[in-house]
Amino acid sequence: MDKRVVITGLGVISSVGIGQDAFWKSLIAGKSGISKISSIDTADFPTHNGGEVKGFQPQQFISSEKIDQLGRASCFAVSVAHLALESAKLKTIPDKERAGVCMGTTMGESQILEQLNLAWVKNGPEALEPALIPRYPSNVLSTNVAIEFGLKGPNYVIPTACAAGNYAIGYAYDLIRMGEADMMLAGGADAFSKIAFIGFNRMFAVAPEKCQPFDKNRKGMLVGEGAGIVVLESLESALKRKSDIYAEVLGYGLSCDAHHMTAPFSEGIKQAIEKSLAASSLRPEDVDYFNAHGTGTPANDKEECAAINQVFKGRRLAVSSIKSMLGHTMGAASAIEAVACCLAIKNDILPPTINYETPDPECDIDCVPNVTRKQKVNIALNSASAFGGNNACLVLRKFPPL
């Protein structure tokens, strides 16, 4: 069995907007969601900026009683699932036995873990609140979504760090394609993490003020937070209920630079791109838009651009990084970027890479600098990389295809 799989709903929570309309409006305006960090004290660090989600009110989506039982990442995940199902015009899910959840994350419920650790350090083990202990394991992200909607199908969390969103969508695609499920909520969620913020600062990977992917003078990434979920359905299911279709998932490619834990290598990224094209029966010249991992760190951008130019052989393919606006949302990043790709396909508009000032010969690509571009988008590739050498590239196509 090899079913076609389509995306019928989009949910997003980000520093530039909550919900696809606000999110897309900000992206095409080139609006930055970077602001002064409020959730932690940054006085001891050289950077004080990040992509925090301001004005998020989970009570708009979740009952107060349930909110009290959830960490911030789970509040993101459940809320964004509500947004995705609303987008898919699904007030109820027809067959909950064949509907599931697949979420990606880097930090899980790290804020709760940080709270527990602080209590332990200050007052000893007796200070740990037992009620908090079941709330921090990463598996709660998908479990809490499944509980909220009564879903009894496949339920997974994929913790492949900053490529986890693409991994989650790819795995959910496989489940539907092979007939194991009819519908999946797939994406990623991460809340702002003190551990991640300190860690990336200690690695000297954080920019002092702004993220400048592909710019010669780029100084690093900025830590962000958020969530993205897409509703995946078999084409048969979507057509049966006359659903709007944002895009068709054609395939994905994975690779692992297992010999290196931190900086990605062009060869691994190249392999993921090539595998995604092969899985989708496409040629490089078929691709219209490439949504890059584009963190703004010197090594990542250089290696990613090298991979792009090796695969597309110097062709001036349109490439952009929305991390310039959002910051790096960790395990949510490629899920949020999948939403951006769907909206680019739907609207035939490419989001820009903002903060681009000085060309870099080592990043010789068309990065859609600073200004949105109108362009037909039939095929979009969404690329993600992560610590541990995990690379994942997802292929999306306009439906019906041009």
Image (cartoon, rainbow, N blue to C red):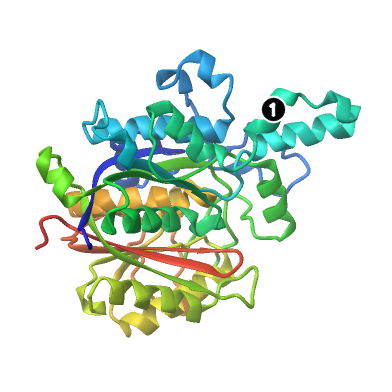
Do we see residue 281 in this rendering? yes
Q: Of 373 and 180, which appears nearest the observer?
A: 180
Specify the quadrant that holds the N terminus.
bottom left
Specify the quadrant that holds the C terminus.
bottom left
Residue 219 in percent (x, y) is at 60, 61
Q: Residue at x 35, y 30 (%)?
A: 82
Q: Residue at x 53, y 20 (%)?
A: 67
Q: Of 309 and 177, which appears nearest the observer?
A: 177
Residue 179 in percent (x, y) is at 27, 54
Q: Which residue is mark 1?
A: 132
Image position of 292 with respect to 146: above or below = below
Q: Secondary structure at mark 1?
A: helix
Do we see residue 351 in this rendering? no
Q: Quadrant of residue 25?
A: top left
Image-based side of 154 in relation to 216, left or right = left
Residue 234 in percent (x, y) is at 21, 50
Q: Residue furthest top?
A: 64
Q: What residue type is disc 1 on?
A: Leu
Q: Residue at x 74, y 47 (%)?
A: 45
Residue 319 in percent (x, y) is at 34, 66
